[in-house]
Image: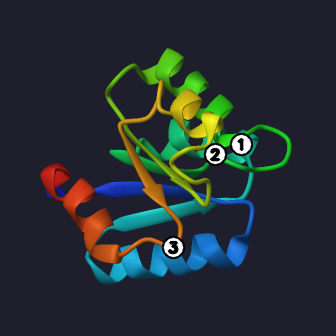
Amino acid sequence: MGANEVRVVVVDDVSEAADALASALESDGYTVMTACDGERALALVDEFQPHCVLLDIDMPGMSGHEVASRLRVLHGSDIVLVAVTGWGKADDRVSHAFVDFDYYLRKPFDPAALRKVLRPLT
């Protein structure tokens, strides 16, 4: 891995959404891997050691919130966690999810907003 390489994991149960976001990030120069469920996301974080994890909140099985909670226990604040969700700002689940997340992006989001979040990692 290169010295300036920023590694990102994208987690979304809709594989097409994860792949599209990964492609956009790769075109911006990030090294990206994807996972479509919480268990795979946790394993991938351990092996890939990303700087940032973009997590869909509303996934079947292990939710993005649960993944974020486990990542905080395992890695503390060493990983930037970004909630990516279609939930509205007034939804109680969003404020609950923010406990473990550094940032929140509502779908569909402007790629420029994500670039602002990732820029400090470069």
Q: Earlier in the sequence, mark 2 or mark 3?
A: 2
Q: Earlier in the sequence, mark 1 or mark 3?
A: 1
Which numbered mark, 1 or 3, is in the foreground of this view? 3
Give me the C-alpha separation between circle 1 and circle 3: 21 Å
Amino acid type of the residue that numbered disc 2 sits on in the rendered structure: Ala
The residue positioned 56% from the left and 33% from the top of the image is 97
Answer above or below: position of 16 versus 105. Answer: below
Q: Report which residue position mark 1 lands on.
A: 38
Mark 1 to mark 2: distance in Å? Answer: 5 Å
Label 1: state its secondary structure.
Answer: helix
Residue type beneath disc 1:
Gly
Residue under circle 2? Answer: 41
- Residue in the picture at 34% in, 75% down: 111
Contact? badges 1 and 2 (CB < 8 Å)? yes
**Label 3: which secondary element:** loop
Q: Residue at x 73, y 40 (%)?
A: 63
Residue located beneath label 3 in the image: 108
Q: Residues within 10 Å of mark 1 (few under 14, many from 20)?
A: many
From the viewer's side, name the closer residue of 94 and 32: 94
Res. 67 visible in picture: yes
